[in-house]
Amino acid sequence: MGDSMKYLKNVVTLKQFPEKCTGCGICIDVCPRGVYEMKNKKASITDKDLCIECGACKKNCEYGAIEVAEGVGCAAAIAIGMLTGSEPNCGCCD
């Protein structure tokens, strides 16, 4: 992935609750951006700014270890722009 796919730093709503993680690894499998990795038998966030808030990790985590407001803000604008070939426009930077 890399820095070329980052838009703004520290705007993503992604939160992880390590105490609830069982280490099943489903978040690693479903994340399209490689946001997670396994460390000490638990999933860990590699780089929060890579998250596009698609919600796949939250929807697939049976243990409530992940919270994210999917499809919101700047990350959603980036995803829509990538899918449609248009310029990202979240409305907050006009």
Image: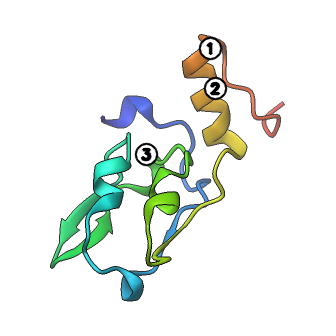
Could one spot residue 7 in this view of the protein?
Answer: yes
Type of amino acid at the residue the image marks with label 3: Leu
The residue that disc 1 covers is 84
Q: Secondary structure at mark 2?
A: helix
The Cα–Cα distance between marks 2 and 1, rounded to whole angstroms, is: 6 Å
Residue 48, horizontal then vertical, whole percent? 44, 56
Could one spot residue 46 in this view of the protein?
Answer: no
The Cα–Cα distance between marks 3 and 1, rounded to whole angstroms, is: 19 Å
Residue toward you, 71 or 2? 71
Type of amino acid at the residue the image marks with label 2: Ile
> Where 26 sits versus 42, above or below?
above
The residue that disc 3 covers is 50
Q: Secondary structure at mark 1?
A: helix
Circles 2 and 1: CB atoms closer than 8 Å: yes
How crowded pointer 1 is (Cα within 10 Å; few <14, some 14-19, many 20+) is rated as few
Question: Where on the picture, by quarter, is residue 76?
Answer: top right
Identify the residue at horizontal 54%, vertical 36% (top origin).
Answer: 7
Residue toward you, 22 or 34? 22
Checking the image for residue 59, the label placed there is none
> Where 55 sits versus 8, above or below?
below
Q: Earlier in the sequence, mark 3 or mark 1?
A: 3
Circles 3 and 2: CB atoms closer than 8 Å: no
The residue that disc 2 covers is 80
Identify the residue at horizontal 26%, vertical 64% (top origin).
Answer: 25
The Cα–Cα distance between marks 3 and 2, rounded to whole angstroms, is: 15 Å
Outermost residue on the left side: it is: 40
Residue 72, horizontal then vertical, whole percent? 71, 46
